[in-house]
Image (cartoon, grey):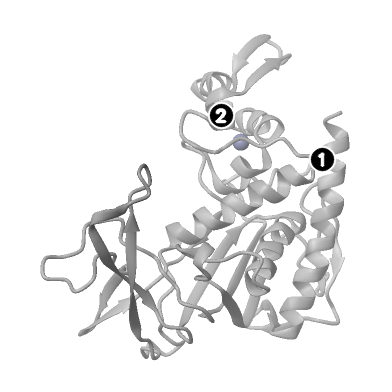
Amino acid sequence: MKSTLWTSSSIILREAIFRGYIENISPLRIGTGREPPLGSRVDLAVIRIKYGESDIPYIPGSSLKGLFRCYAGRIASSLGLDICSGLSKENCIETKKVICRREGYEGEYILKNLIDRLLRDKKSSEAMEELFKNACILCKIFGAMSYKSKVIFSDAYPIDDNGKILSFKFGSRTGIAINRRTGAVAERALYEVEYVEPGCKFKFEIMCSNLPNYVLGLLGLIIHMINNGEIRVGGFTSRGYGLVKINDLRIYVKDFALKEKKGILPSLEDGIDESIDVSDLVEIRDDLLYFHDDKAWSLINRLEGVWYNAANKIKSSKK
Ligand SMILES: [Zn+2]
């Protein structure tokens, strides 16, 4: 039997959730990307949202997704994998030239046109096969065009599991604007930069559908690099901002692929992915595989190993 492609959205093989708190240990700044509100004391305000009566800072899911996609790209290309930029008009689906030998469809196409033609002929599993074979790993994970992302990043709020607001404090610093061209102090020289003071805990959640062990390993590696300071969150990172720690890490997995073998995370892609034994790490909670704190980090270590092996296999299969 041919194994089901994990990129398919018509079947559920597995759901995995990474959950925990991102705690900033240096100032954290995620800007609004807009002009400050009238009467605002600061020129560069931190993004915030209304929660009950309070205005709370938060980390938008879209910022986290951008961060993960960016570093997934850096990691994959440092390991020799071909990846696209993922931008609109530059992603694999819209740009990749493919040669199709499928009967009745022989010829050279832009991937999008081949997929569209197969879909028009109601050949959706063939269209998915072409996407799977031709799109880069980033497009497969984070989506491109009408193909949906397999990972959803929720907004991270300073709110605990019971919905109570955790403590936070805004701070601000004065900067001096220098005219980049002349090097002189600009006309409106002083500006206020707002940030969130260290010690704020933002609850995050990353939901993954159908991701094989090696892809969970790539995401896990990024979580690891965020936790050890190799990846910073938000803006002004060159000034020491955005250093964070991950606290209370929890990983939940619901596996539909190999129900009978509890304690095994099965491979979801023949020849690339690997099954791993997690029986020494796992707890079963509400029918879910549950990994907490040290055990969640140990799971990430194992998944990272699967990622590095898979990257090598993908690289040598493309030669
Ligand atoms: Zn791509």
> Is 135 left, or right, of 86 in this rendering?
right
Query: Looking at the image, which residue is at 74% across and 61% down?
Result: 217
Q: Position of residue 166 (x, y in %)?
A: 40, 90
Taking the image as four quarters, which one is ligand 1 found in?
Answer: top right
Residue 233's label in the rendered image is: none
**Number of marks in the image?**
2
Q: Which element is circle 2 on?
A: helix
Instruction: Give the camera-side residue of 312 and 132.
Output: 312
Answer whether residue 158 is visible to the viewer in this image.
yes
Q: Position of residue 8 (x, y in %)?
A: 61, 44
Residue 314's label in the rendered image is: 1
Residue 93's label in the rendered image is: 2
Q: Is residue 195 above or below residue 150?
A: below
Q: Is residue 63 above or below residue 110?
A: below
| Residue type, label 2 | Ile
Q: Is mark 1 within 8 Å of ligand 1?
A: no
Tell me the quadrant of the picture where the N terminus can be found: top right
> How far, Cα to Cα, is label 1 from label 2?
19 Å
Q: Position of residue 318 (x, y in %)?
A: 82, 31
Q: Is residue 23 above or below residue 237?
A: below
* Mark nearer the N terminus (1 vs 2): 2
Residues marked 1 and 2 touching at CB (< 8 Å): no
Q: Position of residue 172 (x, y in %)?
A: 33, 77
Residue 301 appears in which quarter of the rendering? bottom right
Q: Is mark 2 within 8 Å of ligand 1?
A: yes
| Residue type, label 1 | Ile
- Specify the farthest residue to the left: 39
Q: Which element is circle 1 on?
A: helix
